[in-house]
Amino acid sequence: MVTMRDVADRAGVSIATVSFLLNDTKPVTAATRARVERAMAELGYRRNAVARALASRRTHIIAMAYPALDHKFGFSAAEFFTSAADAARKQDYHLVLWPVGNDGGELTELVGQGLADGVVLMEVQLDDPRVTVLQETGTPFALIGRTSSLEGLAHVDIDFDRTVEDAVGYLHGLGHRRLALISGNLNDPLFSTYGPYVRSEAAFRRVAPEYGLETVVLECAGSTLAGQDAMGRLLRDHPDTTAVLIVNEFAALGAVAGLNRLGYQVPDDISVLPLLMAPEMAALTNPALTIMRTPGPELGQLGTEALIRQLEGADPLPPQLVPAKLYPGATTAGPRRS
């Protein structure tokens, strides 16, 4: 096994200098850093993460807290994870996924063990108990999402207002005048203050009247079966609907299946446009879904960068809102019936 002494001998420096560089405990000149890093590459030296953590009192591990028991993993979530991991790697950090609940209990235990330097929170509630846990323990963190009070919180999020405005404007431009939103189930205590559901519905209730449209909103759980059921209820109660927006990506898959089973043609009889989805998920239906593409790659990177800037003592990343963008598919067209 190659040791620090081997690296020091190859680079012509002391072991202490190699240690300073590896553990970020003292500055070294650019020329010295280059010699040491070249020697490490030539010898195939691998850093000892445990030794580094003991020396610097930092693990260079950041945790992404994702409440997996409450939120299904889909392609959209995977894009957040992979882009966050890539952003961490480029800054010499490792990202781990913590599938902890939203109540903050498990998070309290994990941060108390000092396993991670900081936390990126996903699937944020408007009143999120995990934020209180991290503040009380003095743990650096950043949000991919927004609470109702954001003072002093590093955060990035989807621009739900812009996303809904663009989606409604697109369908209105195709000629649709009977739109509906299948939103999340805000009656479920787990999702009653879930940011994406609350903000998407609020935006639709604001935007629809601006286009002279009736505000039709149905609540729906985040599953394919719930999506099928929601389409049945929608067409029973509002049979003149010509286009539907859907917040949850799994419900959107079920909606298309439900329409097919009911004998409706998509998009001839009704257009379907999910508000938050990744292209890989959109390709699972027949026909492939037209979607508002979730900005997971951008937000995963930005959220991780916001946290790392805190850990490195750099200038904070300004809060950023990124809208979902229209991604073409085959489930939207002009209405065949008025």
Image (cartoon, rainbow, N blue to C red):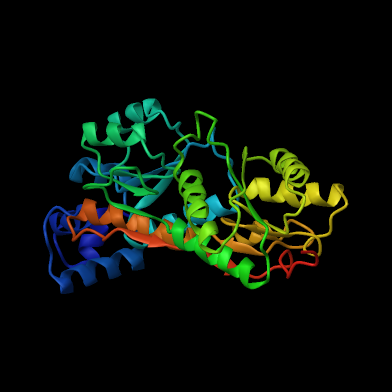
Q: Residue at x 22, y 58 (%)?
A: 316
Which residue is at the far front? Answer: 212
Q: Quadrant of the C terminus?
A: bottom right
Task: Left or right? Give the position of 282 relative to 278.
Answer: right
Percent across and percent down for residue 129 are 35, 31
- Vertical order, 299 against 255 (above or below): below
Task: Left or right? Give the position of 230 relative to 33.
Answer: right
Q: Residue at x 21, y 52 (%)?
A: 23
Percent across and percent down for residue 277 are 59, 56
Task: Left or right? Give the position of 60 relative to 181.
Answer: left
Q: Is residue 86 visible?
A: no
Number of numbered labels in the structure image: 0
Which residue is at the far right? Answer: 263
Q: Nearer the viewer, residue 34 or 104?
A: 104
- Vertical order, 138 against 31 (above or below): above
Q: Residue at x 59, y 41 (%)?
A: 72
Q: Nearer the viewer, residue 205 or 146?
A: 205
Percent across and percent down for residue 40 are 31, 63
Q: Is residue 257 visible?
A: yes
Q: Nearer the viewer, residue 227 or 132?
A: 227
Q: Nearer the viewer, residue 89 or 70?
A: 70
Percent across and percent down for residue 185 are 57, 37
